[in-house]
Image: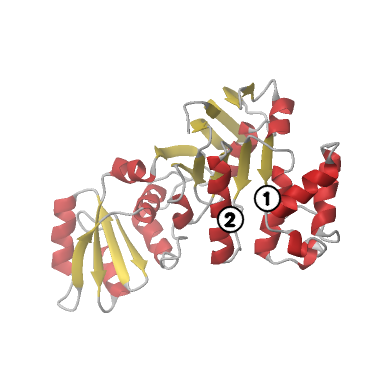
């Protein structure tokens, strides 16, 4: 990676009615960088991505994408960007080859046949080239969508939750492909809910209710929150979690499989409360705070821009505890 910026936006704002969907977003993505864009549903990720690539005009703010002004030169941006939406948006009654050929026609490629053949080869699609897109599994549809995005050789990929509903092996293969593209100098901005994917990004940004709460490497994001985390194993963890809510030093309690993660900023008060309320049948130890702990913590303190009053951090963490089971989705 070098110092050239693929995306450089400052103070972007977007409102829909009385809802402030994106609030003073400032963000940079370097050339050849995989940049993870995280946040809960409705946080403004998709709106932000569309503004960055010229598909949506911001109410205010400035920026460039691949050196082009996001407001004045949006048509140039579109020629150099590959955009993969959340939903599969290709033709299910056409084969993989026919879908790619149609996209090549849209881009008016003179060497259309060669481009399609290369895409089939590069993405491992040759064996299924004649199969109808509607009969493909989620992983193969994802591979087709990525191949279509790459046909016109874009310098930047914008991927909006591309692995939602895809099995773990297909997700892993997809991320291997992303790192190969980044090694060729292609920049990638990818929104995701999965913590294991976030850890594979070069840098991260976390947005909640339109506001950017943190950005940097995974280690920098974790360190920025200055949290202490303890793991508790044993019986009746749900009951212990309920007891700990609101106690000194306890900011959140989240169940991860067979362990309860207890997190807070006041390390001394947290340990005292934990030792007071954990029973003899519980095994406790201090552990490193992970990304999921951090994101749940940030979400707990974020102000919902669509509600009169946001939930308290304790209730947010408690609601997340049922989902945070080691599959990387607890922060959604």
**Vertical comparison of 73 with 158: above or below:** above
| Identity of the residue drawn at 36% across and 43% down | 221
Q: Is residue 244 left or right of residue 174?
A: left
Q: In this view, does 270 lie to the left or right of 323?
A: left
**Vertical comparison of 324 with 237: above or below:** above
* Closest to the observer, 117 or 85: 117
- How far from the left and from the top, in percent, is residue 176? 54, 53
Q: What element carries label 2?
A: helix
Q: In this view, does 104 lie to the left or right of 292?
A: right
Q: In which quarter of the image is residue 320?
A: bottom left
* Closest to the observer, 65 or 87: 65
How many residues crowd around disc 1 within 10 Å: few (fewer than 14), some, or many (20 or more)? many
In terms of sequence position, does the residue under pointer 2 or pointer 1 come before the other? 1
For residue 296, say whether it is visible. yes
For residue 209, say whether it is visible. no
| Identity of the residue drawn at 61% across and 23% down | 67
How many residues crowd around disc 2 within 10 Å: few (fewer than 14), some, or many (20 or more)? some
Q: What element carries label 1?
A: helix
Residue that label 2 marks? 174
**Vertical comparison of 174 with 258: above or below:** above
The reply to whether dot 2 and dot 1 touch (C-beta < 8 Å) is yes
- How far from the left and from the top, in percent, is residue 87? 69, 54
- How far from the left and from the top, in percent, is residue 282? 20, 74
Between the residue at mark 2 and the residue at mark 1, the CA separation in whole angstroms equals 9 Å
Residue that label 1 marks? 146
* Closest to the observer, 298 or 9: 9
Q: How many labels does the image show?
A: 2
Indicate the colouring scheme.
secondary structure
Q: In which quarter of the image is residue 186?
A: top right
- How far from the left and from the top, in percent, is residue 79? 73, 32
């Amino acid at each position: 990676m070098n110092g050239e910026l693929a995306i450089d936006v400052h103070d972007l704002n977007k409102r829909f009615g009385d809802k402030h969907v994106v609030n003073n977003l400032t963000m940079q993505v370097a050339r050849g960088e995989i940049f993870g864009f995280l946040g809960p549903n409705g946080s403004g990720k998709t709106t932000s991505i569309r503004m960055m690539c010229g598909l949506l005009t911001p109410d205010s703010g400035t920026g460039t994408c691949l050196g082009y002004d996001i407001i004045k030169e949006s048509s140039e941006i579109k020629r150099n960007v590959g955009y993969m939406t959340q939903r599969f948006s290709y033709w299910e009654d056409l084969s993989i080859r026919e879908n790619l050929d149609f996209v090549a026609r849209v881009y008016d490629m003179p060497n259309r046949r060669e481009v399609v053949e290369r895409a089939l080869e590069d993405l491992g699609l040759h064996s299924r080239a004649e199969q109808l897109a509607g009969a493909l599994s989620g992983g193969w549809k994802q591979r087709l969508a990525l191949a279509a995005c790459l046909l016109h050789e874009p310098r930047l990929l914008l991927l909006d939750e591309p692995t939602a509903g895809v099995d773990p092996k297909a997700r892993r293969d997809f991320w291997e492909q992303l790192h190969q593209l980044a090694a060729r100098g292609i920049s990638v901005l990818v929104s995701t809910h999965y913590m294991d994917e976030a850890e594979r990004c070069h840098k991260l940004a976390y947005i909640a209710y339109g506001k950017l709460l943190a950005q940097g490497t995974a280690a920098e994001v974790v360190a920025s929150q200055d949290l202490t985390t303890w793991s508790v194993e044993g019986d009746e963890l749900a009951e212990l979690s309920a007891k700990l809510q609101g106690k000194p030093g306890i900011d959140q309690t989240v169940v991860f499989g067979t362990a309860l993660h207890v997190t807070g900023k006041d390390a001394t008060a947290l340990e005292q409360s934990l030792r007071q309320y954990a029973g003899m049948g519980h095994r406790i130890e201090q552990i490193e705070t992970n990304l999921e702990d951090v994101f749940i913590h940030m979400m707990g303190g974020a102000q919902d821009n669509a509600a009169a009053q946001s939930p308290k951090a304790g209730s947010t963490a408690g609601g997340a505890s049922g989902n945070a089971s080691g599959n990387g989705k607890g922060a959604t």
